[in-house]
Image (cartoon, rainbow, N blue to C red):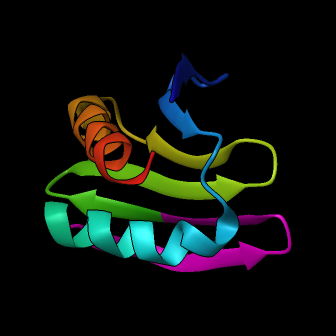
Amino acid sequence: MHKYRDASQRLTIEFFDIEADLYPQITQFVVNQFQLQPVGELVTGPQERFQEFQHLRKVIGLEWDFWSGYCVVAKTKSAEKLVRKIAALIEQHHS
C-alpha cells in the first residue's frame, strides 16, 4: 500500500500487487461494504479501469491501471477519511 497526493492534491492510495482481473470483485466488495452509488459509467481500456462512486457528498474513484495497480482516490476533500477506511479494508482482505 502506497499513499500520496496527486498533482491536484487528492489523496490516492495504491495497491501495486492487485491485478486487473480482481478489479470487479474488489470494487463490488467495496461498493457493498460502504453503500456506494456509481457516478457515471465504468471506463475500461486495455491498461486501465476506473469509475467514480459517491456516498452522501463524498466522491471517490476506484481505479486500476497497468502502472499503479488498484487505487482508491479521494475526488473530494471530504472523502479522505472514507478513502482511508476503504484502503484499510482492501489491505485487510486482498493484500
Residue drawn 36% across the image and 63% down it: 53
Quarter of the rendering occupied by the C terminus: top left
Q: Dominant secondary structure of the magenta stretch?
A: strand
Quarter of the rendering containing residue 43: bottom right
Residue 35 seen from this side:
no
The residue stretch that appears in magenta: 36-51
Q: Between 60 and 28, which is closer to the camera in this rendering? A: 28
Quarter of the rendering containing residue 46: bottom right
Residue 10 horizontal/vertical position (percent)? 49, 28
Residue 14 horizontal/vertical position (percent)? 56, 36
Residue 93 is a magenta residue:
no
Q: Is residue 27 left or right of residue 70?
A: left
Residue drawn 30% across the image and 30% down it: 80
Q: Is residue 12 left or right of residue 47?
A: left
Residue 76 horizontal/vertical position (percent)? 36, 38
Residue 45 is a magenta residue:
yes
Quarter of the rendering containing residue 44: bottom right
Name above or below for residue 55 compared with residue 22. above
Residue 29 seen from this side:
yes
